[in-house]
Amino acid sequence: MTSSVFQKSPFQARLDALNIVQQWTSWNGYKSAQVFDTIASEYFAIRSTCSLMDLTPMEKFRITGPDSQRFLNRLVTRDLSNLAIDRVAYVIWCNDEGKVLDDGTVFRLGENDFRLCAQHHQLDWLSISRLGFNVNIEKETDDIAALAVQGPTSFSVLNKVGIEGLDKLKPFQICQQSISGIEIMISRTGFTGDLGYELWTSPENALDLWDLIYGQCENGNFDIRAIGLHALNMVRIEAGFIMPGEDFVTAETAVRADRSRSPFELGLSWLVDFEKPYFTGKKALQAEALRPANRRLVKLSVEGNKPPADAFLYDKENGKRIGTVKSCVWSPILKANLTLSDIEFENGSCPEKIWAEIYYQKELEWKSSWSQCHVSHKPFWKNARASLTPPMKF
Amino acid sequence: MTNNLKVIVIGGGHNGLVCASYLAKAGLSVQILEARDSVGGACAPIIDNNGNKLAGLAHASYGLNMQILKDLDLPALPIQLSLDTISLSEDGSHITFANNSVSGRKISERDSKSYRGFIEEFKKYSEALDVLTTNIPPRLKDMDWHDKKTLIKIGWNLRFGLGKKLMREFLRVGGINIFDVLNEKFDDPAIKGAIAFDAVLGHKMGPRTPNTVLSYLQKISFGENNSLCRSDNLSTLLEEKAKSLGVKILTNSKIDRIIIEDGICKGVKLESAEIFKSDLVISNADAKTTFLKFVGTEYLDAMFSHRVDSIRQEGAVARINLCLKALPKDQNLEGDKLFQRLIIAPDMQYVEHAFNHSKYGEYSDHPILEMIINRVEDRGPSVNSITATISASFAPYDLKGGWGKNRNLFVNRVFETIEKYIPGFNNLVKSYELLTPCDIEEQYNCVGGHWHHGEMGIDQSFMMRPVHGSAQYKTPCKNLYLCGASAHPGGGITGLPGHNAAKQIIRAI
Ligand SMILES: Cc1cc2nc3c(=O)[nH]c(=O)nc-3n(C[C@H](O)[C@H](O)[C@H](O)COP(=O)(O)OP(=O)(O)OC[C@H]3O[C@@H](n4cnc5c(N)ncnc54)[C@H](O)[C@@H]3O)c2cc1C
C-alpha cells in the first residue's frame, strides 16, 4: 500500500518519525500504525508507564439541537436521560431486530450538545434515525485531533505538562483546559482498562499538543511511547472490551442472517435498559429476553501456552463443536491465553466444560492439542489504579 | 375472544365504517372518531360552494365486496346507478364498454371478440387472486396455519383454478406491463387507451410501468352483477348500518396522538386535548399519518420509521367539481350516454405522455380524464344546477413550483382537453372547484392525497403493504391496527381492508 491513499492525521508528522517498522494500516481511511517499534515495548508502555495513541480516525459525530438527548436515547440501548453535562457513557446501538450495529461513547458537552464516538462509519444510520427529531448531526471526525494518553503514569505526565485539575477528574468525566495557549478537552476515558485520558483539540494544535506531552519523554522525565493498534488490541482483550468487526459482524455488514449479534449474545445485557423510553430494537430484545439464551460471547481463558487463535471449541475432547475463538492474546501480565469466544448455549446456559482444539506449528510441522478453557465473568485484568481519584503519582 | 373490549376507530372512511360494523357485530364496543364533519371519507358526498350535493371523490366504483354486503346485510348498489364507460374520441367515434363487451362505430369484429376473450382471461386471473384480496395476506416467515391455508389456497387457485396453461400465462403477464399485453391483444388504439386508463388512474404509473397488469386487476371487478356504479349513497348506507349495530360515531374529532405506554396502545388524544382510552385502536388513516404523526418515531424502531417515511404516496389525481349552465348538446353523446362515465384516454401513447410529465413534477399537458355528469333529478337541492365531477390526472402532489398559480393553468388544460372531445363544453362552465392532491391531503387528512393511501407498486403490496413490519393489519405497537387503504389490498371502494382487518382483530383478541 502506498501511503498516499491514506488520509493523514494531524499528528502524522510525529507518527511517521517515530514509526521504525513502518507497519501501517487503514483505520477509517486514516494512515494508522499497527506497530511503531515492538509490540512488547508498546504493550508495557500501556501497562507500566505511559502510552500515546492517535485517536483521530475514530468516527466522531456532533449532535446538537433541542431533541438531541431524546434522539440519542432512542438510538442507544442504555438510558441517557440522567447523563450529566461533562459526563461520558459507553453505549451500543442496535437495528430494529435488536442486533448490534456498533459501540461507542457519548459525551455530553452541553444541555443540547453531544459527541458520539463510534468504531465504524455511522452517518447513514444516524440520518435514518433522526426522522421525527429536531437535531443537527455533523460528522466531525476530521475536525478534531484526538490523542489517547493511557497508562499508570499518564496522570503524572499530564500533571507535569501543566494540566491542572486532573486529581479531581473521575472516570467518565470531562474537563476543559488551556495549556500553553492550546484549548483542549480532557476526558478520563479509554480502551485499555487502565488509568488514562483522551485529549481532544482542534487539528492545528495537534503537533504542539503532541510535543508538549512527548517532550516529557525526550527530556527524560517519563518513559512515553507511541503505540499502535496491535498493542491496544492486547490490552483491550485483557480488559474484556469487545471490538465490533473483530468479535462479531456488525449488523450493517452481516450478509448471513445468523451472523449478527444482539447485546445479550455479546454479554452486554448490562447495557440494555428496558425501563427507559423506547429505543430501536427494544421490542426485538424484549422478545429475545424471554427466550433461553442460545449463544454468548464469553471471556474465555485457555490453559497452556499454545496460542488458541481461530480455535474451535468443544464440549469435551473430540466432543461436540460448540463455538469458536474470536479474538485472543497471550497476556504478558497474567501469563495466560485470553480469548473472547462465541459459545453456543444449551438450554439457555453455558456448557460446563469447554475444550479448545489448538493447531500449532513446531518447525513447520503442524500439530494439534487439547486445552481446557475457563469462563471468566469479570474482566481478565483489572487494577484499582484505573479508577482511583486522585490517581497515584509517579 | 374477550367480549366488551373498547375499540376506537380513527377515521370513518368507508373502511373504518366496515371494520367498525364487523367488530360491533362481534360484540365489541366501538367508537369511531372522525376529523371531518361527516363520515364516509373519500366517498362522503361533497357539498360545493353553491350548495350542490355532489358525489364524493370516489364517484364511480364497483361497490363493496359481495361478501361484505352479505355479512353486513347491505343492499347492492341499485341498477339505476350503474355506469357504462364511454371513451371519447376527437372525431366523435366514441367507444362504449358495457356488460363486458366493447362497441363503437370503428370497432372491428376481431377486436370486439378479442375484448371478450380478454375479459374472460382477466376474470380468471382476478378469481385466482381473490383469495389474496379477501384474506389477510400471509406472512412468509413464522407462518401460522391461517397463513399456510391462505398460501395453499392461492397456490391451488393459480394452479388448478387457472389450469397449467393459463397459470403460465398469468405468471408471464403479471410481471410485464399493460402496454405490452394490450398490444398483443388489440389493434384499436382507443380500446387500448381506455384499458390502460383504468390500469393507471390513481397511480403514478404509465401504461409502460411494470406492475400495471396487477394494478388493473386490482381496480376492475369482473363479476357478472358487478358493474361500475355511482357510489352516491354508500357512506349514508354504511353509516346507518354501523349505527344500527351499535357503533358510536363522533365527527369533528380530529386525532392528534395515539397514546403509547410501554409499547402498548392505550387510546387516543384529540387535537382538542380530549383523551379517549380504549383497549384497541384501529386506524383508518394512512400509514404515514398513523405512524409518523399519531404514534411518533420516538416510539418506533428507526428502520421501520424510515420505511414508513419512504412509502411512495404522492397523489396524482385531482378532482374538479363543475357547475354547468346547461347540458352539453353532442350528437355523439345522446340520451343516456351523456350521463355515463366519460373518459379521455384516446390511446396508450397519450396516457404514457400524460404520465411522463408527472415524473418530472409537472402536470400533464394533455391530461387523462374521467367525468360524470349528473342527472338533475338524481341529486342536489337546487333543481336548476347541472353538475359534473372530474377526476383528472396527472396532477402531481409534488408539483414543481407548487400549486398556487398553477391551479388555473391546470384547470384550463382540463377544459381545453374536454373541448376537443365535446365541442362547446367550455362555454357551459358556470363555476368550478379544483381539489389538487394537496387540497385532498388537507381536507381528507391523508398524506399526499393519494387515491390508494400509497402507491400500489408490487413492493408496496400484499404482505409488504403498507411496509414490512406492519403487514397483516398489525403494527409494532400492541393493540394498534390499521384498517384503511394503506393496508392490503389497498384503495378504491371495496371495504376489503376494513373487512380483513376486522377478521385479523377478531382472530387476535
Ligand atoms: C381524487 C380521488 C378520486 C377517487 N376516485 C375513486 C373512484 O372513482 N372509485 C374508487 O373506487 N375509488 C376512488 N378513489 C379512491 C378511494 O376514494 C379511496 O381509496 C378510499 O376512499 C379509501 O377509503 P378509506 O376508508 O380507506 O380511507 P378514506 O376514505 O380516506 O377515509 C379515511 C378517513 O379517516 C379520517 N382521518 C384521517 N386522519 C384523521 C384524524 N387525525 N382524526 C380523525 N379522523 C381522521 C379521514 O378524515 C377520513 O374520513 C379516489 C381517490 C381520490 C383521491
Image (cartoon, rainbow, N blue to C red):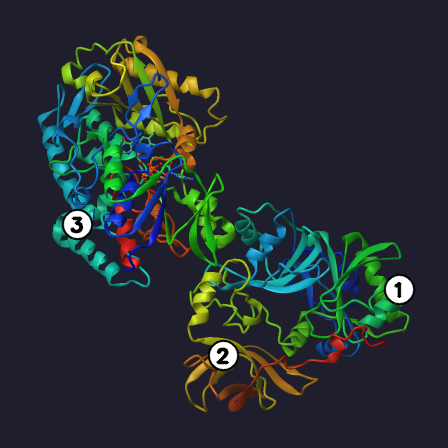
On the rendered image, what quadrant is the C terminus of chain B found in?
bottom left
Is the residue marked by circle 1 packed among few (<14), some (14-19), or many (20+) residues within 10 Å?
A: some
Q: Is residue B297 left or right of residue B341?
A: right
Q: Is B118 or A162 nearer to us in this picture? A: A162
Q: Is residue A380 above or below residue B39?
A: below
On the rendered image, what quadrant is the N terminus of chain B found in?
bottom left
Is the residue marked by circle 3 packed among few (<14), some (14-19), or many (20+) residues within 10 Å?
A: some
Q: Is residue B22 left or right of residue A380?
A: left
Q: Tag 3, which secondary structure?
A: helix
Is the residue marked 3 within 8 Å of ligand 1, measured from its CB? no
Q: Which quadrant of the frame does ligand 1 lie within?
A: top left
Q: Amino acid at mark 2?
A: Thr
User: Do the numbered discs 2 and 3 sit on residues whose CB atoms are within 8 Å?
Assistant: no
Same subunit: marks 2 and 1: yes
Q: Residue at x 30, y 47 (%)?
A: B488
Is the residue marked by circle 2 packed among few (<14), some (14-19), or many (20+) residues within 10 Å?
A: many
Which residue has dot 3 on it? Answer: B167
Which residue has dot 1 on it? Answer: A162
**Residue B109 falls in which quadrant of the image?**
top left
Q: Is A385 or B366 nearer to us in this picture? A: A385
Residue A75: horizontal and vertical position, in percent? Answer: 56, 57
CA–CA distance between discs 2 and 3? 49 Å
Q: Nearer the viewer, mark 3 or mark 1?
A: 1
Residue A373: horizontal and vertical position, in percent? Answer: 54, 88
Residue B495: horizontal and vertical position, in percent? Answer: 25, 41
Q: Is A260 or A309 nearer to us in this picture? A: A260
Which residue has dot 2 on it? Answer: A324
Numbered tag placed on residue A123 in the rendering: none
